Every structure is written in C-alpha cells, then in structure tokens.
Image (cartoon, rainbow, N blue to C red):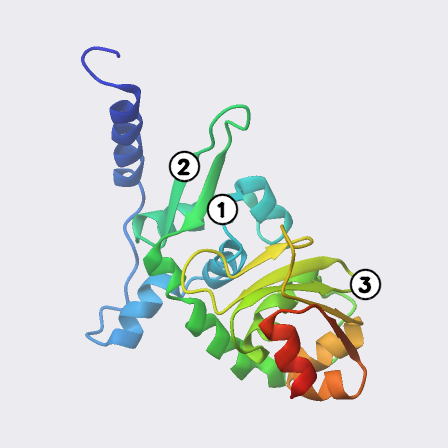
Amino acid sequence: MLLGFTKFELGKSNDMSRLRRMSPRRSYDQYCSAARALDVVGDRWTLLIVRELLAGARRYTDLHADLPGVSTDVLASRLKDMERDGLTTRRRLPPPGAAYVYELTPRGRELLPVLQALGAWGQAELGERRPTDAVRAHWFALPLLRALEGEGLVEVRLEEGDFHLYVGAEDGPVYGDGPAQGEPDAVLVLDTATCTSVGRGEVSVIDAVRDGRITVSGDGTPAKALREA
C-alpha cells in the first residue's frame, strides 16, 4: 500500500488517467445509428483488430505480427481508441508473463456478426490472391465458422498452419491459432485451394466434404453432421 492506495487502486487510477489523455473521437455528427457505429469502428484497421481479438486476449506484439502493414503508431492509437470506446480492455498478465494483453469486451464481441456479414459481402472481392497479399492460416477461421453449424470444438489443418474453431460459442473466443487445446469434436483437413474456394463462396463445406476435398474425422456432433449431410 502506498499513501493509502492499494496497487489495484493505483493501477485503476493510472488507467483512468491514460484514458482521459486520449484524443476525442471524431464524429460524422449525424443522428443516424449507422453513422454513430462508423464513428466507433469506421477507422482503418479497427475491424481487423477486432478480427484478431476474436481469438481471445492478444499481446501488442502478437497483434502487430498478424496485422501486416499497420504501423506501430497507428496500432497503438487504434487500441487506445477502442479501449476508450468500450470495445476492448487492457490487463496485465500475472508473473512470470507480466505482459499487457488486449481483449474484447462483450460490446466488442457483438461485432462478430458484423464481421461475418462484411466477410460474406466481401467474398466477391477476393478474386485471385495477389503477389503482395499477406495471408495467415487463421484468417480462414471466420469464413469456415460461417459455414459450420451446431456446437463444438473443430480443429482445422491447412498447409499454412492449424487453427481451431469454437463453433456455436456464445461468449469468449470464437477461434484460436494452432491445434485445439484438448480433444476436438471434429478435425478438418483441407488444402489452401479448397479453403480459398470456401472463403470465396464458390463451394460449401458440405459439398467439399462430399467431393473428398475436405477430410473429416472425429466423433463429435460437428463431424457427424458433416459426414451425414
């Protein structure tokens, strides 16, 4: 305790001071819910940060690594804005980690269907991958999540790497990088071309399973649903 304040109270006070120092939010100044929403999430990179944080708590360095093209200044500014607007929180991990991580608030997680709808709308814009296009395996998570029904833990194995999906999860992360932690209810093995076709909306997951382009294993509900469809 220092001068009558606990460490928790001092930390909370420092966070409030940091938030007060943030620049005020720019606004369209229009009495319209779409305009108000864009006041909060319309800046470049904001929704892509949400996409990354749908995997759960992330360190700043991890976010920067998985958002190629964003500068450190812009990323730091967006994270502060998102914290100010109630989309994210920042907390310090206990030792030995002792690093700060960012995670979505319930309000921020409510943007999942917004990203899903935007992704579905953007399927027609994908086209062929350009030489300058970066890619991460887990960027296929949301398109696959749109295509799967039911509930369960699904592991996806791609050439670029593995990730896992929490299908039907009502709170918490909706996907994670790397293999599933624990026994998955289903394992999907597919190549990048098939995953890209699913992401573009050219083929459904069910049709790709029927054609043998996706191999399904596991005894959980998602695996059975895909094999029996």
Q: Which mark is residue 57?
A: 1
Mark 2 to mark 3 CA distance (whole Å): 34 Å
For the point 61% across and 66% down, the residue is 141
Viewer can see residue 204: no
Instruction: Out of 78 and 183, give the one closest to the viewer.
Output: 183
> Which x, y percent locates residue 58?
53, 45
Q: Quadrant of residue 90?
A: top left
Task: Say if mark 2 contacts mark 1, CB within 8 Å.
Answer: yes
Q: Amino acid at mark 2?
A: Arg
For the point 29% across and 73% down, the residue is 35
Q: Which mark is residue 159?
A: 3
Q: How many marks?
A: 3
Q: Amino acid at mark 3?
A: Glu
Q: Earlier in the sequence, mark 2 or mark 1?
A: 1
Of all residues, the one furthest to the front in this rendering is 219
The residue identified by callout 2 is 91
Q: Amino acid at mark 1?
A: Ala
- Figure quadrant of the C terminus: bottom right
Instruction: Out of 224 and 135, give the one closest to the viewer.
Output: 224
Mark 3 to mark 1 CA distance (whole Å): 25 Å
Viewer can see residue 21: yes
Q: Which mark is residue 174?
A: none
Q: Residues within 10 Å of mark 2 (few under 14, many from 20)?
A: some
